[in-house]
Image (spheres, grey):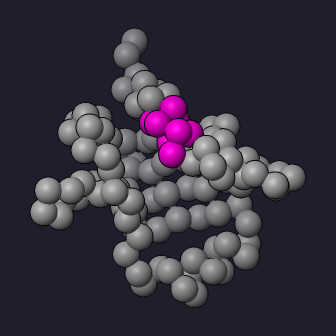
Amino acid sequence: MFNKDMLVSKALKSIANYFISDYGTLSYFSVDSSKKSIDLTVMLNGELTELNLKLFNYFIFYEEDKAFFSFESIHFSRQWLNMLYQNKFKSKEIKFEIPSNFAKPLKMFI
């Protein structure tokens, strides 16, 4: 049986690993398109343990001719990062530009 989320997760993990290679590597990446959530685990350079993140209510949007990825909220496996996000970033828009060659295929699948 075809599992779209598993296929998308595998592809996005490879792409994301490329973009974060200066900072660490993703060991786990899972998209749940029905819940609009993404779970990921990253091993950051210089850290002793992995960091788990969960993005809630992700979405893709366009500004002019550029595509962006964003989310409504995030949860970290580290308490201090959750507090930092709540206190400093929750009210701010956090967005990541999607390279143009990935924008259309990504929109179709997630």
Q: Is residue 83 above or below residue 70?
A: below
Magenta stretch secondary structure, dominant: helix
**Where is residue 98 drawn, in percent x and y?**
33, 50
**Where is residue 101 drawn, in percent x and y?**
26, 37
Q: Residue furthest left?
A: 64
Q: Residue at x 65, y 52 (%)?
A: 23
- Image: magenta residue range: 12-19
Q: Residue furthest right?
A: 48
Q: Within the magenta stretch, is there residue 51?
A: no
**Where is residue 69 drawn, in percent x and y?**
34, 56
Q: Residue at x 47, y 68 (%)?
A: 73
Can the viewer see residue 42 in this picture?
no
User: Is 23 or 95 nearer to us in this picture?
Assistant: 23
Q: Residue at x 87, y 52 (%)?
A: 48
Q: Point out the image quarter for the C terminus.
A: top left
Q: Residue at x 40, y 49 (%)?
A: 35
Q: Is residue 95 above or below residue 104?
A: below
Q: Is residue 26 left or right of residue 16?
A: right
Q: Is residue 72 above or below residue 22?
A: below
Can the viewer see residue 58 in this picture?
yes
Q: Is residue 55 left or right of residue 78?
A: left
**Where is residue 64 drawn, in percent x and y?**
12, 63
Q: Point out the image quarter for the N terminus.
A: top left
Query: Residue 96 sits in which quadrant?
Result: bottom left
